[in-house]
Amino acid sequence: MMLNVVFWLFGFLRMGTTGLTAQALGKGSGQGVAEAFTRSCLLALILGVLLIALREPLFSLLTMLIAPGPEVAPLARRYFSICIWESPATLLIMAVSGWLIGMQTTFWPMVTAITVNVVNIALSLTLVFACGAGFAGVATGTLAANWAGVGVALWAATRCSRGRPLLCPLSTALKGSELGKFFSVNSDLFLRSACIMAVTLAMTAFGSRLGTLALAANAVVMQFFHFFSFFMDGLAFTGEALVGRFAGARDRAMTGLAVRRTMLWSGGVAVTFFIIYLAAWRPVTDMLTDLPDVRATVAGLRVWIMAIPPVTVAAFIFDGFYIGATATRRMLLAAAVAATAFFAISCSGLDTGLNPNMQLWLSFMVYLALRGALLGALWPSTMRRLRL
């Protein structure tokens, strides 16, 4: 959990790189493509080394936030002290994967992710059971797997460079005309990620205050959200790559076509998931938990399970369009306004006639719906600002 919180905040390395690379590709700028790769990888390395250097205060801060029990804390420290050395590798994989998606390929990021997971499983099993490394073997397997993933990602980037130089001179990367835009895009995305992370952590924190039963039931319902998000992320990546490429080429017709087609596919996926959740929420819940009290509590929240696809689809897909267009300031604005609405509803004590946990889920759905609505409302003017 500690490592996921840290690495998720640096997701801008993937998103920002995709938009900038796709636009450079659309412009036909091999120099721009190389600059995007070099800057992103350089920033990933710097941030990774910084995380390692600050590992002790970082662990203390995360321990204070998550508050593991006395029996868990020493194990957490041991695991953290090993896996923190994967920081440069994990961030590099994010950067290179973003660049590959910007180059219009999602195959090699998939290969990289599969490689990391397969190597992780194989090494962890070997170190724990064959070598007797115990708990530390899992952490060591994870560490080694991520560094193996860097090798695969860089090899894939070399293959996808299309004969162009993969790197640009360091002096160009640090002084190029696009350097200001690079940092502006990434800082916006970082702050947006912080808004989203605040809401996600608040859902867990507020749910825990309502008791272990509510916390457990919320965790089950959240799995329905995550499962839908995995499918939507694939379509969002498509939107990032295509919109970025055609926006870079200033091709209004193809940009509009990419947006319409991606929205059509997203709508189809949302309808499909709505039908699945409507018909099968109970058997899926039964697979996720065997506790009767938790199942009964989830049954009381089933309206939110069915609301997930239609309510959240716009937030996912418009995120992809804005990343491709590198209109990140507007993404940040939408996320900040929506997060403010979430905390206003969940913390205000407003009498909605719902029990506290239902009101918590109402605030979460309002947050997601508002994010999507704001991004959708701002998209036409965003297209005009891009001169499309």
Image (tube, rainbow, N blue to C red):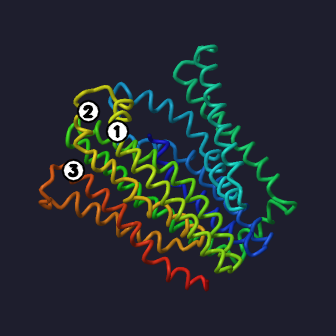
* Residue 225 position (above or below residue 23): above
The residue type indicated by label 1 comes to Val
Q: CA distance from mark 1 to mark 2?
A: 9 Å
Q: Tags 1 and 2 in contact by the CB under 8 Å rule? A: yes
SS for callout 3:
helix
| Kind of residue at badge 3 | Met
Tell me if residue 182 can be seen: yes
Quarter assignment of residue 171 = bottom right
Report whether 31 appears left or right of 91.
right
Determine the CA span between mark 1 and mark 3. Answer: 14 Å
Q: Which residue is mark 1?
A: 220
Report the residue at 37% width, 61% height from top. Answer: 368
Tag 2 or tag 3, which sits nearer the N-term? Answer: 2
Q: Residue at x 65, y 35 (%)?
A: 145
Q: Does dot 2 land on a helix, a strand or a loop? A: helix
Q: From mark 3 to mark 2, how far is it between C-alphas?
A: 15 Å
Q: Nearer the viewer, residue 271 or 12?
A: 271
N-terminal-most mark, 1 or 2: 1
* Residue neighbourhood size for the residue with mark 2, other residues' Cα within 10 Å, grouped as few (<14), some (14–19), many (≥20): many
Query: Measuring 39% from the left and 70% from the top, which residue is drawn there?
Result: 373
Left or right, 348 with respect to 230, comes to left
388 shown above or below 290: below
Residue bearing mark 3: 358
Front in this rendered view, residue 108 or 317 = 317
